[in-house]
């Protein structure tokens, strides 16, 4: 599955414990990544600064559902179950 353009759920719902450019302490769950644009696109997507954890994320129907709302809900639920 390819990421839905303008979704950004994976840049909001989960926590990221590793440092990110501009977020040296990582990113808390439910907080927008500082690199997520107003139209919900990753500003580091093609950059060598993109963190490994972001590079390894793979959009799947199970994680992302059929739309952005489902993706946010599913990723938030997974975060709460594993966080």
Image (cartoon, helix red, strand yellow):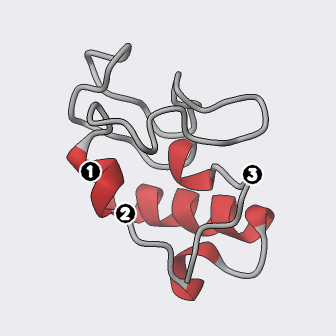
Mark in front: 1 vs 3 = 3
Decide which of tag 1 and tag 3 comes sooner along the chain.
Answer: 3
Q: Residues within 10 Å of mark 1 (few under 14, many from 20)?
A: few
On residue 6, the disc is 3
Residue placed under numbered mark 1 in the picture: 53
Answer left or right for 24 relative to 36.
left
Q: Which residue appears at 36% of the width and 17% of the height?
A: 23
Q: Residues within 10 Å of mark 3 (few under 14, many from 20)?
A: some
Q: Are marks 1 and 3 in contact (CB under 8 Å)?
A: no
Image location of residue 15, percent across then percent down? 39, 42
Q: Quadrant of residue 75?
A: bottom right
Q: Which residue appears at 26% of the width and 50% of the height?
A: 53
Above or below residue 33? Residue 41 is below
Q: Secondary structure beneath disc 2?
A: loop
Above or below residue 56? Residue 52 is above
Q: Are marks 2 and 1 in contact (CB under 8 Å)?
A: yes
Q: Secondary structure beneath disc 1?
A: helix
> What is the CA distance from the residue labelled 2 to the residue labelled 3?
16 Å
Q: Secondary structure beneath disc 3?
A: loop
Is 58 or 65 nearer to us in this picture?
58
Q: Which residue appears at 47% of the width and 39% of the height?
A: 29
Q: Quadrant of the N terminus?
A: bottom right
Q: Which residue appears at 62% of the width and 53% of the height?
A: 9
Q: Is residue 14 visible?
A: yes
Q: Residues within 10 Å of mark 2 (few under 14, many from 20)?
A: few
């Amino acid at each position: 599955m390819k990421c839905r353009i303008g979704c950004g759920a994976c840049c909001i719902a989960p926590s990221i414990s590793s440092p990110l450019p501009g977020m040296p302490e990582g990113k808390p769950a439910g907080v927008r990544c500082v690199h997520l644009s107003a139209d919900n696109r990753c500003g580091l997507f093609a950059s060598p600064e993109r963190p490994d954890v972001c590079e390894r994320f793979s959009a799947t129907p199970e994680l992302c559902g059929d739309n952005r709302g489902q993706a946010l809900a599913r990723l938030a639920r997974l975060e709460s179950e594993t966080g």
